[in-house]
Image (cartoon, rainbow, N blue to C red):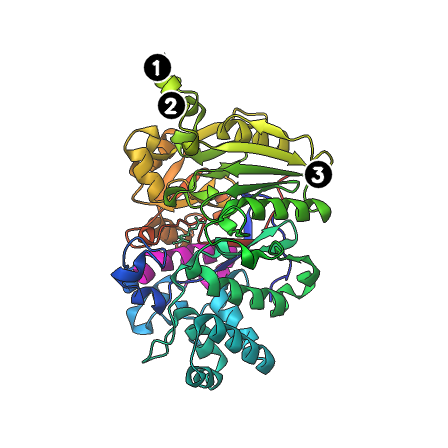
């Protein structure tokens, strides 16, 4: 068993441990009439999303984070005769890594405890409005099967409640800030069960035992149940995609379609009261499906490099190419803009305002991460219309850094990849990289300044990238 340490102090320090969830059979149950309610843009093909897309992610993560599980076994685990059991949490052949941690596995482990099992069944049945018969049926299931039913919503032959197809986006269900865990409060009904399951895991799994007094749950505001249902700002909702730990002393919080102003306010108060960070920057983005969380608009690549949507760049915001009439007209369109305000723990009544996202990100690179080099930006779709917005929609800005300068992104975002190539990055497809790793032509340690191209035709229909599909638990410190 690897260390049970949890610590995340940056977006780019070498990744050592994370939570993931592979697409389960629930994704194969999404129907067109429910796709939007369940936050999918389309229905996906289950076998393709697993075998031809997500499994590559798992293989790559294992190579970087837990190589003994995979090295020398690539052709064996991909052999159809082996039934892909390596990737199935309920199988005895499952990879079961303590660094690439599958949530379904953790759930099955806590469900071995009779008391936890009974309590979680009661809670799930309450939120899913299950009949007494279903309640009894769940009590009969062994832990591994029950874990799968809680996530997929289905037994082998019966659908008991809706799936939670967004569970693959582990980023949103909790976030490690230094050595604390901030739990989410989902804005969308479709993600409610995910939050419940995660709460039980964080409070009951031995992996998090040392951290019980470091779990942060945002309270509701008093008498929240009397609020009208459309008072979005007053509701306390927060999803992990709106939180970024950019240094050990500085956290970014997005106010977005998913994270409310009230939640940001409460989170800042708690982070300051508990002395967890010194600075919080709040980034209010337009509340639109296109930009559901801040990590759909920008992510970090290196100390001095970020990828972002050009629409929020200085050039665009300051209308550098526009004539006077256009500038005046555009300045009225406030709802499409970003607002940034930074609070310091020692002087909360004296906040700092940033005009543009680039100004904030440059400030982080220079002042939090002590970067002397010029800060560079890669823009979605190379900042060319319509590729900028098309590629942002398919997560060109939502990259996961395995280590500083080594990022994963979708193959379909051609122009963004071109921009990385122009910036001097190696571009390599995951299948080729895996072969090179397997053949000892390269090691993860030797890889630098690289964009790893991942297959994405099905994954992108679920509207999230690899930043969303990862909940880092441990990264090396960089500051
Ligand atoms: N951090 C993220 O941006 N996560 C993406 C979540 C996608 C999912 N379909 C959702 O709408 O919640």
Q: Residue at x 36, y 32 (%)?
A: 419
What is the secondary structure assignment of the residue under circle 1? Answer: helix
Magenta residues span 49-72
The number of callouts visible is: 3
Q: Is residue 71 magenta?
A: yes
- Residue marked by disc 3: 345
Quadrant of the snapshot with the C terminus: top right
Ligand 1 near label 1 (Cβ, under 8 Å)? no
Q: Quadrant of residue 110?
A: bottom right
Task: Please name whichever residue, 125 or 452, is drawn nearer the observer in this view of the structure.
Answer: 125
Q: Earlier in the sequence, mark 2 or mark 1?
A: 1
Task: Please name whichever residue, 256 or 90, is drawn nearer the observer in this view of the structure.
Answer: 256
* Mark toward the viewer: 1 or 3: 1
Task: Please name whichever residue, 362 or 80, is drawn nearer the observer in this view of the structure.
Answer: 362
The circle drawn on residue 330 is 2
- Residue marked by disc 1: 325
Q: Main secondary structure of the magenta part?
A: helix
Q: Is residue 62 magenta?
A: yes
| Local crowd size for mark 2, using a 10 Å CA cut-off: few (<14), some (14–19), many (≥20) | some
Q: CA distance from mark 2 to mark 1?
A: 9 Å
| Local crowd size for mark 3, using a 10 Å CA cut-off: few (<14), some (14–19), many (≥20) | many
- Left or right: where 136 falls relative to 222: left
């Amino acid at each position: 068993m690897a260390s049970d340490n949890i610590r995340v102090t940056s977006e780019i320090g070498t990744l050592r441990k994370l939570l993931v969830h592979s697409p389960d059979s629930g994704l194969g149950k999404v129907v067109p009439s429910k796709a939007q309610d369940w936050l999918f843009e389309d229905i996906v093909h289950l076998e393709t999303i697993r075998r031809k897309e997500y499994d590559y992610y798992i293989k790559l993560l294992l190579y970087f984070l837990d190589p003994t599980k995979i090295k020398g076994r690539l052709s064996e685990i991909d052999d159809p005769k082996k039934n892909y059991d390596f990737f199935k949490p309920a199988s005895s052949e499952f990879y079961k890594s303590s660094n690439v941690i599958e949530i379904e596995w953790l759930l099955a482990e806590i469900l071995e405890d009779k008391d936890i099992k009974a309590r979680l069944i009661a809670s799930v049945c309450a939120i899913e409005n299950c009949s007494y018969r279903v309640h009894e049926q769940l009590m009969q299931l062994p832990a591994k099967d029950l874990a799968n039913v809680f996530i997929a919503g289905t037994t082998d032959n019966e659908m008991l409640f809706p799936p939670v197809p967004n569970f693959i986006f582990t980023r949103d269900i909790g976030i490690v800030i230094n050595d604390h865990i901030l739990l989410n409060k989902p804005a969308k009904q479709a993600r409610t069960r995910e939050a419940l399951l995660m709460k039980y895991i964080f409070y009951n799994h031995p992996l998090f035992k040392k951290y019980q007094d470091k779990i942060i749950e945002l309270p509701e505001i008093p008498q929240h149940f009397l609020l009208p249902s459309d008072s979005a700002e007053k509701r306390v909702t927060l999803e992990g995609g709106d939180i970024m730990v950019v240094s050990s002393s500085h956290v970014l919080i997005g106010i977005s379609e998913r994270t409310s102003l009230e939640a940001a306010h409460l989170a800042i108060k708690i982070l300051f009261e508990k002395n967890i960070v010194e600075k919080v920057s709040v980034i209010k983005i337009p509340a639109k499906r296109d930009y559901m969380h801040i990590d759909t608009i920008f992510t970090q690549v290196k100390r001095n490099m970020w990828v972002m949507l050009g629409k929020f760049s200085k050039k665009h915001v300051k209308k550098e190419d526009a004539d006077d009439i256009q500038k005046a007209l555009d300045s009225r369109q406030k709802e499409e803009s970003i607002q940034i305000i930074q609070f310091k723990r020692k002087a909360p009544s004296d906040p700092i305002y940033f005009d543009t996202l680039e100004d904030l990100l440059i400030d982080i690179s220079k002042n939090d991460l002590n970067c002397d080099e010029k800060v560079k930006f890669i823009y979605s779709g190379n900042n060319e219309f319509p590729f900028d917005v098309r590629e942002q929609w398919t997560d060109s800005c939502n990259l996961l850094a395995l280590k500083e300068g080594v990022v994963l992104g979708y193959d379909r975002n051609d122009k963004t990849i071109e921009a990385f190539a122009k910036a001097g990055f190696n571009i390599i497809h995951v299948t080729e990289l895996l072969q090179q790793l397997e053949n000892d032509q390269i090691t993860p340690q030797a890889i630098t300044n690289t964009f790893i191209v991942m297959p994405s035709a099905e994954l992108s229909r679920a509207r999230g990238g690899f930043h969303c599909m990862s909940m880092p638990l441990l990264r090396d410190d960089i500051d």
